[in-house]
Amino acid sequence: MISRCQQGDQEALKEIFDKYHNKVYRIAYGVVRHREEALDIVQEVFIKLFRSIKNFKGKSHFYTYLYRMVMNTAIDHARKTGKQFISSLDEEGSFEPSDELEKGPERILLQKELEERVKGAMEKLPAEQRAALLFRDVEGLSYQEMAEAMGCSIGTVMSRLHYGRKRIQELLKDYVELHGQSRSSSNVSKGGNPPKL
């Protein structure tokens, strides 16, 4: 498909778009958190891709090549518009609550509050750590794929993940302890097991 695309096959271009545009949108939305802007980024990325695909030599996996292009385009867009780079832990990218929590008003409020705390914590991370968490925990890339997409070594990827997760834990520690204890006490008093956050 890539080879056909490099030779100017329009059908191959369409196949690439159909295969990857949802992932490109999800990453773009994770950066700018605005639907219309994310759609603009998708369009810009595929225009860039179709213009530059002849230069793709196959030294890395195609999707890591594409992800690097998406991240660079989206972060450049965010900087131009003064937006903060944050992960897509919301309705577009979705942060899933534990199945053990009750689906009542209190649970919904706590879940929304937790989502906002996580987003706020993500905003405080350096861009490289945020990107590492997005690629690993949202997109599910391997360390090798992340290294290729981010243009660094696997050791650097692992370091960014380690320090990013450690910082998130530190920033959320008080919230988790407070709500974990209160919900655990309430649940145990009813004879149940403590729920997970």
Image (spheres, helix red, strand yellow):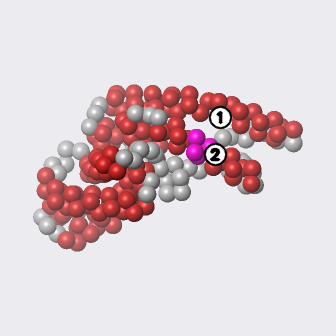
Q: Which mark, residue 175?
A: 1
Question: Which residues lie in the magenta part?
Answer: 113-117
Q: Camera-side residue: 82 or 19?
A: 82
Hey, what amino acid is under mark 1?
Tyr
Q: Are marks 2 and 1 in contact (CB under 8 Å)?
A: yes
Q: Which mark, residue 80?
A: none
- The verdict on residue 84 being magenta is no
Q: Residue furthest bottom?
A: 11
Label 2 and label 1: CA atoms lie apart by 10 Å
Q: What x and y, as percent, mark residue 2? A: 21, 59
- Residue at point 48% right, 39% down? 122
Q: What x and y, as percent, mark residue 144? A: 33, 38
- Residue at point 44% right, 53% down? 33
Quarter of the image where one finds residue 190: top right
Q: Camera-side residue: 26 or 119?
A: 119
Hey, what amino acid is under mark 2?
Glu
Q: What x and y, as percent, mark residue 95? A: 56, 49
Within-10-Å neighbours for mark 1: few <14, some 14–19, many 20+:
some
Q: Main secondary structure of the magenta part?
A: helix
Q: Quadrant of the C terminus?
A: top right
Q: Quadrant of the N terminus?
A: bottom left
Q: Camera-side residue: 15 or 182?
A: 182
Circle 1: element type? helix
Quarter of the image where one finds residue 143: top left
Q: Which mark, residue 113?
A: 2
- Can the viewer see residue 23 in this picture? no
Task: Pick whichever of labels 2 and 1 is earlier in the sequence.
Answer: 2
Within-10-Å neighbours for mark 2: few <14, some 14–19, many 20+:
few
